[in-house]
Image (cartoon, helix red, strand yellow):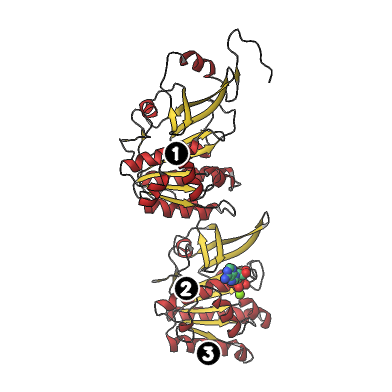
Amino acid sequence: LPLLATGIPGFDTVLGGGVPAGDLALIVGDAGSGKTTIALQTAFHLARSGSATCFVSTTSEAPGRLLEHARSYAFYDESRVGKELLLLSIYPLIQKGLGAVRAALEAEVRQHGARLLVLDGLSTLHDLHSETAELRRFVYELGDLLSTLGCAILLTSSRTEPSDVHSFAEFTMADALVRLSQSLRGTRSERHLQVVKVRGRAPVLGLHTARIDREGFAVFPRFESLAHRGEITPAEHRAATGLPELDAMTGGGFPACSVTAVAGATGTGKTLLALQFLLEGAENGEPGLLVSLRETREEMTARGRRFGLDLSGRLQDGTIRFEHHAPVDLEPDRMVHALEAGIAALGRGRFVLDGADDLLLAIPDEGRRVALGHVVSGLLRSRGISAMVPLLVPAGVGPELDLEHTPMAALAQNLVLLRYVEYAGELQRILSILKLRDSDFDASIRRYVIGSSGFRLLPRTEADAGLLAAIAGLPSEARVKRPGEPERSR
Ligand SMILES: Nc1ncnc2c1ncn2[C@@H]1O[C@H](COP(=O)(O)OP(=O)(O)O)[C@@H](O)[C@H]1O
Ligand SMILES: [Mg+2]
């Protein structure tokens, strides 16, 4: 059967392609959950391809009020009203019985060759028609009739549970069943769409994030549904960082097409290292994508300037693209879909996600946080992208940083740890590599400085050896007493 696309972003995906011609789809949800919006948006989408929709509003929402509602959305198109979008009123007919209503609807569908019939507000019919058996027959016969005409039916109802004896019939008759809901998370309202069943196809079942704005309704399929789309073939070459000392430790750079987590406390220089990684790629003709959940474009370029990095030049010539997503109202599923779009547009190249911690924090469930790590990692690697992801870890984390079964382990194949330690009254910044995909690496601890020329690893000197040995096993901020030195007061 040909599928009728709703044209609603993400909705067709979770439905397994759309609504098959002639099928009966039921959308249930409380008032304001978006049922009418979905119906209108679908009708206008069909209209654009020349297909007619008979739209029956059973509520007291008169056609004029319905259009008023529709007008608030960008998809509204006045020129389709009365042509591809036919608004029908069944109030006058209801008195004559449901048989008359059915006959009238059939006649309209035939006359206009409609591909879709919307019955918005089945619950109203329930209220007007206490005879459940009769209403059930009405829906059944209408569905049967229209399916032979290849016309799909979209029913909406505010009765959300099939346990309600009145609504049991349409729940069982529906080929597709979708439930809309709204809930509060903190002080803000979140919308969800749940695909309960879809007959004969492979939908993406379960709860998805949804949203209504001026563009209308949009669904953001659970990000797990993006997983395992592409083959991952590890590349042999290396992604140089532009820090010769660091590249020497890794055998020429981080393995290409892998994700490197840079873990460290605030102020250790994680973002700076990631910026240099991006700029080095750009230097060698690799396009870059910098997604920041924290800093704006201006803040990020100012940071680059402070450290002598020409980020703004790269943004201007387009080698590196910048996207800022404000972490307020961070909806992880929406964010991951936005990331996917950005990653797809990047193609092979380098990617930095700054502020990934905020994204992880927005997911209350630990299992889903790990899933997020896998999904983002898979998206990047299957596209041959070399990525660096700064991750905030509490000060005091040492080389024993345990990664197993964490989102970070799911995300990154390589791990660099940045720490600052106080040694004999001086703050030392030190870097160490804890993990590198399929490769041997220099596991020594190295000092680095952050200055006007950016992040710079210091060459190893003989004098360092003792110092580094002393702090090797210590967590950051640990105080190390030089032998013979008197105890200092804190
Ligand atoms: N232009 C718009 N931008 C954002 N939200 C809107 C807009 N128009 C309507 N809404 C919201 O969308 C919802 C509309 O839901 P509606 O489709 O009428 O639900 P139902 O038919 O399930 O009662 C309401 O919560 C309303 O606040
Ligand atoms: Mg409505």
Identify the residue shown where x is 34% and y is 27%.
Answer: 251
x, y percentage for residue 425? 59, 19
Location of the N terminus by quadrant is bottom left
Location of the C terminus by quadrant is top right
Above or below, 489 relative to 361: above
Find residue 48 and report its image quarter: bottom left
Q: Residue 274 has which mark?
A: 1
Amino acid type assigned to the residue bearing label 2 in the image: Asp
Amino acid type assigned to the residue bearing label 3 in the image: Ala
Q: Is mark 3 within 8 Å of ligand 2?
A: no
Above or below, 259 relative to 47: above
Mark 1 crowdedness (10 Å alpha carbons): few <14, some 14-19, many ≥20: many
* Callout count: 3
Q: Is mark 2 within 8 Å of ligand 1?
A: no
Q: Quadrant of ligand 2?
A: bottom right
From the viewer's perspective, tell me whether residue 482 is left or right of residue 319. right
Q: Distance between the residues labelled 1 and 3?
A: 66 Å
x, y percentage for residue 446? 46, 23
Q: Mark 2, mark 1: which one is toward the viewer?
A: 1
Q: Mark 3 points at which residue?
A: 104
**Between discs 2 and 1, the one toward the N terminus:** 2
**Helix or strand or loop: what does disc 2 sit on?**
loop
Q: Which of 285 and 399 is in front in this view?
A: 285
Mark 2 crowdedness (10 Å alpha carbons): few <14, some 14-19, many ≥20: many
Above or below, 314 relative to 255: below
Q: Name the residue under label 2.
A: 23
Q: Which of 293 and 26 is in front in this view?
A: 293
Q: Residue 430 has which mark?
A: none
**Between discs 1 and 3, the one toward the N terminus:** 3
